[in-house]
Structure formats: structure tokens, C-alpha cells
Image (cartoon, rainbow, N blue to C red):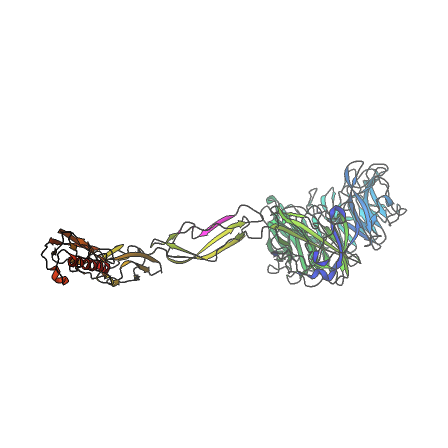
Amino acid sequence: MTVRPEYGCSGRAGVGGVGMGTVSGRAWLSALALVVGATPAFAQGEPVAPDPMSVRRVADLPAEPRFIPDPIQPGSQATAELNGRLYFLSAARDDSTGSTVQELWVTDGTRVGTRSLQEELLPPGARIDPGTLRATAHRLFFAATSPQTGRELWTSDGTREGTHVTRELNPGPLDGITFPAQVFVFGDSVLFTPVGLGETNFDLWKSDGTEAGTVPVKDIYPGPSTASAGGFVRMGDRVFFTANSPLGTELWRTDGTEAGTALVRDIHPGMYHSTPRQLTVMGGTLYFTADSGRYERAIWKSDGTTEGTVRVAGLVPQAQGPSLHHFTALGDLLFFLVTNPGTIELWRTDGTEAGTLPVKTLPRAMLEGPPGMTLVPVGDRVYVVGQGAASGDLLWVTDGTEAGTVRIPLPFGNALQFVRGFTPWEGGLAFIATSGSGVSELWLTDGTQAGTSRLTRLPSSSMYGPPTGLVPFQGALLTSSADPWTPRALWRMERDEAPPTFVCPAAREVASNRPEGTLLVRSPPPALVGNPPQVALRTTHPDSSLLRLHQPTLVTWQAEDATGRLAYCSTTLTSRDLTAPAMTGCPTELTLGTRSPLGLTFYYPDLGIQDETSQDVLVTHSPEDGSVLPLGTTRVTMTAKDPSGNVSTCSFPVTIRDGQGPAGACKVSEVRVEAEGPQGAHAYWPDPAPTDTISSQVSVTSTHASGDLFPLGLTRVEVISTDEAGNSTTCEIQVRVRDSRPPVLSCPEDQTLTSAVMTGTRAEYPLATAEDAVSATELSYSPVVGTPLAPGHHAVQVTAIDAAGNAALCNFQVTVQYDPTTDMRQGLGCSVGSGPSSAVGWVALLALAWTVSRRLKGGKPRG
């Protein structure tokens, strides 16, 4: 499958659903899209160039090989090299017994040349003792147990025919050599110790690999007792060791012959034991510790002669229990450790008592657990490696001075980490550092911080399959380790040009995208440098993998180029809620009115607050919800914080203003006045007096002023009171101008009319007068002028009505008297009588009355 570069390992293939793909190396130089916050992976920072060493898988192994010497057995070694091939033991399960046994393996550094030799070279049931592999120039030696021969010394030239027991010291299933077996290379032969039975009464033997060449050297403790020889060390053409004899456990030497095997010196005279330990050669002198009978364990030295075996310095009284150990020679100095229940100190000696001095006190944690401490001389320095400490392994270096004894910072800072293997290499110390999460790297140091650098990342799995041991071989380094796809394999690391190298952070935080964590979708792998042409990619967590929230998860990527070079990156990914709660509906600003000079009690608006991971969102307010905000503008803030500490804020200004207009401006609501004339009347009212609880100044405006002339009828006066905040209140004064006064009416005097006829006469009287200051007046009479009146008294009513409907009344009397002798004839130019002439007169009179009545209507003369 071809994986698009921007998507990373999106495919699914391989064992356990592991994503794989083949991509161009340049495609992975993009940034890590998932990285939110990362801690440095290594003490020297992220690489900008490929690592100087490449990693290749040599072969899969059935179980963990033994690449680390047994610290309990001094002088033991885990591997042996013969004819360009490395022999080692690897643990395997014996199905017949259910136990773990050690199988013999060989490698020439290639996949084809790496295989198990157990069935090829050894008979069924044969088991090699760990720590006994030794090689001379032409042969391999080891102690092995078989059902047929018991424990004996074996040899091999790498072929089935050349693999056999050197000589069966005790025929049959009885053991012929001790356990643990002491096998020491001396030239083309090996020295070893038998069990001390039958033919093995001799305490020291040697073998060149042939039956004839497997012969006794010396019966150190004559009789059935055993000498328990051990602690072999070579100095020049002689081998020194400790052995028990009738003179106690003392220092011995041998040149491989019976005559040349002798006691060096009876340090603790008589049958007492001096028990030499820590036999170490420095230059042409042997150094060791011994108890000379002074109740102390002192440092001694020897040139191989009795006279030349002398005490250097008495350092540790036996009664107090401290011990001297880890003697290590470097040039003309011998380094060693002095420990007691409270302290651990590094010492040195130049072979004199005055030159035996403490160098520095080391952390007690270096001795907290197995496999303990190791001193490794390299060049002009000694490295002190503390392994198994509960607080993590420690690495120190010394040049023999206190100032030059310093701790070398390990790659993962102060985090828990372990040294899984170390060996002198290229003038420095190569070592494997493994973090507490299982990430492993190969480093090289020259003893300085500047000269400490990473060589490559190693296959990483978990704490149950970390690298074990480090072995130099053919210019390369070998180790064994598991990775997520291999239970256990042999790996070869060698210098190379531009091997694929991941830019690999030690840890990343990835944003959660669901409540339970992060579902990986199109997650790119770490970038690759080194410009590899084509690489196949794997990851332990392909797309659709779920990273549980807040649970650190070790995610491993593997890149393999066309030549089989491998690159690894193991990063602890932790799904974190990195997204702050979403807040919707946040106002840009708010303006609120108040009726109090103290301000307003403010309550925050309800916002939409959602968090993709948790419903438990803490909302806080500043100032507190329900606080009184003063007049003016205050910035308020709502903060939403999820359980992961992500914070969203909504901040906006709130302006509290005077929200109440003035009150009580109009003292009256209505003013009624009498019209003064046709234009109306002047109206007056009390001056407005507005009140305001907040503003000190209020302005008043109105549509009319008091004292203005108002027309007849209703006029609405609008009075507006405005405070300093611009709030205004309007009140109304209704001004009513009315004409309620009737006209001033004057009636004429009473009138008397005479009539010459018995029927009466017409009404005739002078007009009344009427005056009104506002409007014109209309007069009406009853009866009206010209109305026939019979003789007698008649009341005339005069009505005066103005435009407002106001009316005035007055009355006067009109008396009609019958007088036949009236001078009406005179007024008519004739006399009243009978006869024709009289009739004509009456006709004329009636005609005149009709004419007058036609000129009057409603008491008014017709116009």
C-alpha cells in the first residue's frame, strides 16, 4: 500500500493490526501536526542530521541471550569470539521439564550466519553453564552437563565432529568439574578446577582441548579435601589465584606445570586463612586484599615472590563490616570502592600507603539493586556504572581526582532510566540508556558532557523486553532487544552514512477529540531525516486507535529502508483536553439603567458553554455574579475552566447609566382661565420643580410659557424635564380658555301703544342693546316687532346670545290701549268712520300692516 505523506500510517496491515506503508523519506520532513507540547527527548536536543549509526535486525531469538557477565562470578564472561564468529548463550524453554535452559548460539553478524548450535553440536539434554564460554586462538571451551557425562569440560572448533568432552574426569553421570566452574584461558590451554573425586584428586587441571592434553597440574590440598581454587588472573607468563591448603586459603601462582605451581606467601601464618580477594594486575604488580591476622582487611601487592608480597595499607577493620571491592587498574593507579551500610566511596592507590587516598563519596543509590556496580577503564578514565538502583542507574567518570570525578548526565534528564549495557568502544564508553517508559538509545561518551552524544535509537518495546548487554564485534555493536513486532531479536549497530533517523520527541500531548480521549485520524508519523529513498513504515497505533484521556501511551514507529536499515521512534503520547470550553453568545457590550445612585445589581447573561471532553465546567465571574456595579463603565469577565485547566473567557464592558428620568416637574395638571377677548386669555401656572435622585441638575423646557396668551378652547402644554444623563420626563398642563360670561343686555323702557280699533295694533318698540367682549351677539325678541297685539299689557322678552352660547335676557312691557279717538286718522290722512270713505281707510290700514309684517322676521327687520 502506498501511503500519502500528509496522512501518515493510514493503512492497516501486518501483525496485530499494525499500520504499514511505503513512502518517500522527504515526505516525513513535515512538522508534527499532533504536537502541542513536547519535552526534549535527549540531553543534547533534537538531531538535525541522521544518527551516525544504523540498526539492522540480524535474527530473531527464542528468548533473551546472555550478553552481560554474571556479576556474582568474578572473571565470568557472557560471550566468546572464535574465528570471526561470536558464541553466546540464549535462554530457551525446555518443554520436557518446563524449565529455562541455555542454548548455544553463534553469529557472524549476518542473518544467515546466526543460528542455534545446540542440536547441531551438542547431544540431547546437554546444557552449558552460564559464564563458562572461553576461547583460545583455535578452540572454544565451556562447562556443560549432559545425562551421559555429568558436568565436564567441553571443547569445540565449531563443527559437530570437533565438539566433545575434553576428558571425562568422572566416567558416567557423575560431575567431573565444580559448579560454578572455574575456566581460565592460559595461552592455548585453559585452567579449570575439578570436583575433587576419584581421578580428580588433583585440585588444578589444564587442557588444550584434546584428551591427551587434559592433564592435572597440581594437587594443592593432598588427600580428599579440595583446594577450591579460583579468582584466576594472569600477570606475565604466570597465573595467580587463591586456593585452600593445609596453610589455609592463601595466594598461589602457576606457570601451568606442577613444579611451577606454588604458594606465593602464607600471609596469615599457620592454618589460618588470609582469603585473598579482588586479584587485579596493575602494570607488573598484582594487587589484592587479604586478612593478615590484624583484624583488618588490608590492601596487598605482590611481584610473585614471597619477599615481594607486602602489605600496602590497612584500610577496613573487619569488625566494622565495610568491604573493599571492584579493584580496577588504570595506568599506574588502582581504583576501588569502599562500602559500608551508610556510604560508598571511591578510592585509589599508587601502591604506597601514603598514596592510598579517597577520591570521592558516591551516591548510595548506586548499590540499591542487582547487578550492582561496575568499574570500566577506558583510556585515561574509569567509568563507574551503577545498575539496578531504584532511583535509576547512574553513570560517573573519574580521572583519579575529586574535581575530575563527576556524574555524566544521562539522556533522559532526571527521569527514571537504566543502563542496559556498556562496553569500551572507539576510545570511549558506549552504553544503552533506557527510559522508564521503555525507550532505548545507544550513546557514546568520552567522559565529558560535550563528548557525550547519541549514536542511534534502538528497537523499543516495554520494560519487559528492553535491550540486554552490549557486545563489540567486527567494528560493530551487538545487542538483543524486543520491539513491538518482535519478541526478541539480535540487532547489529554500525557506523553508516545517512541512515534513516526519526526526529523523535520523548513525549507529546495530543488534543482530545472525544470525551474518552483521542481517536487518531490521519496522524502523521515523526519526521525522518537522512533522505532515505524509500521506507516502509509501521506504527503500534495506526489510525482509528484510541488514546485514553490522561493515560500516557508509548507509541512506536519503525521505518525500514531498502537495505534493511531500521529507524525507531518511541514517543509517549498523552491524550489531553487541550481545547478550552466553547462560549457562545458573549456580548460585545451592555448598557443598563439604574434608579439608584449606588449603581445596579448586575447578573451575567446566560451563555452557551460546551466542552467536548467534560460536562464538569467551572464558571467563575469577575466581579462576582450579583455584584453592584457603580455608575460608569466596568469591564466584567466570565471564565469557563474545564477539569484539564483549559480556560475560555468572555469579557465585555458594562455601562451603568442613570436610567430614571426626573419626577414632579408639573405642579398642576390643568389651568382654566376666562377669555379676555377674541384672542383668548393669558394663562398662568406655578413654575415646574422637577426632582431627580441621581442627577444634580435638571433642565426644563416647555411648549408654552406661563403667562402666554392662549386661544379659546383647550391647549396642551408639554413640559419636558431632562437630567444630566439625558433622561427626560414629560408632563402636560391642559390650559382651557373659555367664554362663560353672557353679553351685557339692555332693554328699552316700557312702551305704550294706542289703537283706534278694538282688535289692537301691531307691536312696535325700540331695539335693545347688547355688548360682549369676546364675540358678536345675536338678539332675538318675543314677540317680534310687527306682531299684532290686542289691547292690553304685553311682555316683550329680549334674548342676547354670544358665539360661546352664553345668553342674557331682559323684559319690558308694551301696553296697547284702545282709543277710538286716536289720531290715527291724522297719521293716515283720513278719518275713521263708516261709509264708503271709511271702508277705504281700513283697507289702506290693513295694507300698511301687511307691509310692515313682511319686513320683519323673528322680531328683526327684513333687510
Where residue 775 appears, as percent x and y from the top left, is 23, 61
- Tell me which corner region of the image, top left, top right, bottom left or bottom right, holds residue 499: bottom right
Q: Quadrant for the C terminus, please.
A: bottom left
Where residue 134 appears, as percent x and y from the top left, is 80, 49
Principal SS element in the magenta part?
loop
Magenta-tinted stretch: 612-627
* Camera-nearest residue between 818 and 351: 818
* Camera-nearest residue between 608 and 262: 608
* Camera-nearest residue between 582 and 677: 677
Q: Quadrant for the N terminus, please.
A: bottom right
- In screen coordinates, is 510 left or right of 69? left
Up/down of 451 relative to 438, above or below = below
- In screen coordinates, is 727 left or right of 33? left
Q: For residue 379, say whether it is visible.
A: no
- In screen coordinates, is 112 left or right of 791? right
- Tell me which corner region of the image, top left, top right, bottom left or bottom right, holds residue 814: bottom left
